[in-house]
Image (tube, rainbow, N blue to C red):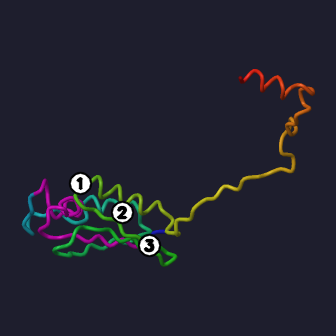
């Protein structure tokens, strides 16, 4: 179960535009001055956390880096997702997927093939199946 998400973004980088818009720090690609910014409680990410009260979300500024979302699960595992050049819907989609994943290690599912003791219902082929001259007739027809 997802416990915490850390959303890292760059203040100036173009690849972080969607992450900044999702956090309410920017609108349509234009940075907003501090006094004109939306109330952080009204941002898309805040709406996501209100809809999912079991998890906490933290935003960290990491200048010079591409945006990432680091998910921390109850079993101690972490999963990192790149949010490079994603729009607001893409960021929220990644957060939704991180929430829906259990956090367990992905294991390969192997199907087990059952093999019976009987090799064929019809039985094994033998030269005597079609009579004594079957092989002779087949060899003459192939010539």
Highlighted magenta segment, given as a residue range: 4-29
The percent position of residue 59, horizontal first and vertical second, equals 26, 72
The residue mark sitting in front, 1 or 3, is: 1
Residue 3 is marked as 3
- Residue 125 location, quadrant: top right
For numbered disc 3, what is the local secondary structure?
strand
According to the picture, the residue beneath numbered tag 2 turns out to be: 50
Task: Tell me the element at label 2.
Answer: helix
Mark 3 Cα shell of 10 Å, populated few (<14), some (14-19), many (≥20): some
Q: Which residue is mark 1?
A: 87
Q: Residue at x 23, y 64 (%)?
A: 23
Q: Position of residue 72 (x, y in %)?
A: 42, 74
Residue 88 placement (x, y as % from top left):
25, 55
Mark nearer the N terminus (3 vs 2): 3
The verdict on residue 14 being magenta is yes
Q: In the displayed image of the protein, which residue is found farthest to the bottom?
A: 76
List the single residue furthest toward the top. Answer: 141
Mark 3 or 2, closer to the camera:
3
Q: Residue at x 14, y 70 (%)?
A: 11
Alpha carbons under labels 1 and 3: distance apart = 24 Å
Q: Is residue 81 magenta?
A: no
The x, y position of residue 27, in whole percent, is 14, 56
């Amino acid at each position: 179960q997802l416990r915490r998400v850390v959303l890292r973004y760059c203040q100036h980088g173009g690849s972080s535009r969607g992450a900044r818009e999702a956090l309410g720090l920017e609108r349509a690609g234009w940075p907003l001055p501090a006094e004109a910014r939306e109330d952080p409680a009204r941002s898309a990410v805040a709406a996501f956390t209100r809809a999912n009260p079991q998890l906490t979300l933290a935003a960290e500024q990491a200048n010079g880096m591409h945006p990432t979302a680091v998910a921390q699960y109850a079993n101690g595992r972490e999963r990192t997702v790149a949010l490079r050049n994603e729009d607001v819907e893409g960021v929220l989609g990644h957060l939704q997927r991180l929430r829906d994943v259990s956090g367990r290690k992905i294991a390969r599912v192997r199907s087990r093939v059952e093999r019976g003791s009987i090799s064929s219902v019809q039985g094994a082929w033998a030269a005597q199946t079609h009579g004594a001259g079957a092989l002779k007739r087949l060899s003459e027809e192939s010539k």
